[in-house]
Image (spheres, rainbow, N blue to C red):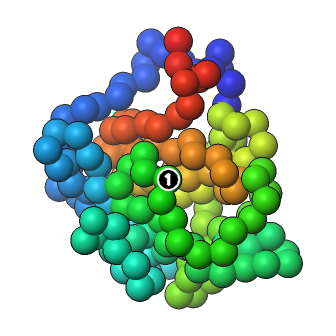
Amino acid sequence: MPKDDINHEDLVIHQTQPSTEASIMIKEDVYIIVTQAFCPNGHNLVGVGEHTFDGYPGICLWVGDGTTEGLVELSPFHGDHTKYGPTFAEGTKLHVQCPVCRAELETIGKCNCEHGELRAIFLSPRRQTAHQIAVCDVWGCYHSRVIDNNEIFSEFVDSSWQD
């Protein structure tokens, strides 16, 4: 979504503690750490893989471009670009699925990168839209946001998006 399309008057970005419904932690008033995340069918995406990130298990997604596919483990630290798994050419549009049941993650809107779409990862086992992470389905795009209580709790976008 281009920044001109954002209603800045009603946009709320929280930098306080998350709700107890979402399973995210604030560490040292700096890091947002996802401790559980769910696919549309309720499978926990955290800890499916073998890698850890500073002792925390990663968020696992099954991704593919029609030729190559595999398990990608993303850092549970919001804003950390570290990941393990297959690699794709920068800008490749990917299918994003649950690694357990292969359900496609729901599209919730266009990404700021203008090439991808944001995919929903739920933060609660109840799979409510009030508590979710939105990640882009384009390889190399790091636009994402954590939404808690229907408000943007944290956002990570490149500096060209900022005022």
Check the image and report above or below for 81 versus 100. Answer: above
Which residue carries the number 1 mark? 81
Q: Is residue 42 left or right of residue 66?
A: left
Amino acid, disc 1: His
Please give the count of numbered marks on the rendered protein: 1
The answer to whether residue 148 shows anywhere in this view is yes
- Image coords of residue 3 (percent x, y): 62, 21
Question: Badge 1: how crowded within 10 Å, few (<14), some, or many (20+)?
Answer: few
Q: Quadrant of the N terminus?
A: top right
Res. 86 image quadrant: bottom right
Q: Is residue 151 left or right of residue 3?
A: left
- Image coords of residue 130 (percent x, y): 38, 49
Q: Is residue 163 left or right of residue 155?
A: right
Query: Going 57% across and 87% down the picture, which residue do you hit?
Result: 101
Nearer to me, 137 or 21 = 137
Res. 105 image quadrant: bottom right
